[in-house]
Amino acid sequence: MDLEKMAASMPPGMQDKLRRIYRRVNPDGLRSEWYIKRNLRIQHGLDRPIRVAFVVQMPEIWDKQAAVFERMLKDDRFDPYILVAPAYDFAKKALLPGKNPDGEWYRERYGGSVLDYPADAFFPEYNEEADFTCVFYDRPYDNYLPDGLRTDAVMQAASICMINYCTTDWEMDDFEYYGFGRHVTIWFASNAVEAANFRKGHLQKSWRKAYDIGYPAFTYYREAASENEFRRFLWTPRWSTAEDGVGSTHFFDYMELLIEWFTAHPEMSLTVRPHPLMFDNFISKGIMSAEEVQALKDRFAAAGIRFDDNRMIRDTFRETDVLISDYSSVISLYLVTGKPVIFCPDEVPVTQEFETLKKGMYVTENGEMLERALEQMTRREDPLEKTRNEVVERLLLRKKHGVEHILEVLDRTFRW
């Protein structure tokens, strides 16, 4: 029986009901449920620090987990480690052999708390010695990981927790990460919409919960706020094209305009930080060749425009004053620094919360509007400052102690 074909012919309400019934009775879901409940049961009553693993692969998204990990290092209730997974080549769509070279980036910061996960290891066997109680993932995608570190293997020996690498600011008909989420015990959501979507996709029970108790990255980025000079711009074009179906990049729409404008305004600076997948996606689709990408970067450099070389965008936020961005979760993070955002919208249907946040942004729907916004910033005119700060405080910073709340949930879950 093809569930999706059957569901497609039904009204939306019936589609949702059919999916819920299927998720309760399908063999894979029942197997996940058995392992999740088993691992919660055998860990109760711990008389030692809770050993926690953070699976990582790329430093660019570590900022969502960093605040929790760093707080655990100072808390006697926890014994946290970073598990560096083998690197993944997005252009070739394959794991790279050997140790992930980005492991050095983590070791420079955290020393002996960083472990390289062997590509051929099977987590239940690996964990016989490592003895991790719970494992955090930085992205809800198993396909980038070696088989033995995917959630269907890990759930056999430990509970799985999640803080997503992005905020959920787009409307969903169904929980987007169902395949990954069916193995998750605790999902720490970025907002109420994300928590509700997890509960919709996975019936919340005593052993599987979604919490909307504060997104750690918001307070982490609030601490990165710095003086605004209104002369250093950051551009973060999206990775996807129209055929990807998740929002289109404005990179080709505004590339020439920005080269020309910043060439004419040498007193201003522009840093370009495309999504990590953008050029790989362009190359894999045949939109650009590797040689064309390099030639384009050379053109930017000749215009005094640099490509960002910081691994964590938090460092880049400190060094810039105004964000120009396609639809992206970096927008919310930049807003909490207090600095202006020039937003370039597309067809992505966003949540009501994001619509409210847009009241504090300079929304530009074409090149002419973008150029006007740039000129306005150079005059240090920021009429939306008060509105921006109000909506940020009300929507993003209303739960200021997310890290502490997450640690309390983990302690309560795994030690009672």
Image (cartoon, helix red, strand yellow):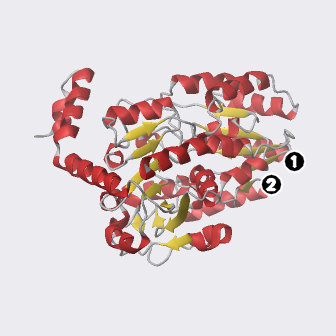
Give me the residue at 44% from left, 77% from top: 97
Pointer 2: what residue?
304
Front residue of 310 and 365: 310
| Quadrant of the rendered image containing residue 325 | top right
- Report the side of 246 relative to 257 (left or right): left
Give me the residue at 69% from left, 50% from top: 314
Query: How far apart are labels 1 and 2 at the CA level?
Result: 8 Å
Mark 1 touches mark 2? (CB < 8 Å): yes
Q: Position of residue 221 (x, y in %)?
A: 69, 44
**Circle 2: element type:** loop
Q: Position of residue 27 (x, y in %)?
A: 16, 48
Give me the residue at 66% from left, 32% from top: 397
Residue 328 visible to the viewer: yes
How dense is the environment of label 1, judged by Cα within 10 Å: few (below 14), some, or many (20 and up)?
Answer: few
Pointer 1: what residue?
266
For residue 8, above or below residue 237: above
**Circle 1: element type:** loop
- Report the side of 62 relative to 86 (left or right): right
Which quarter of the rendering shows the N terminus?
A: top left
For residue 312, above or below residue 262: below
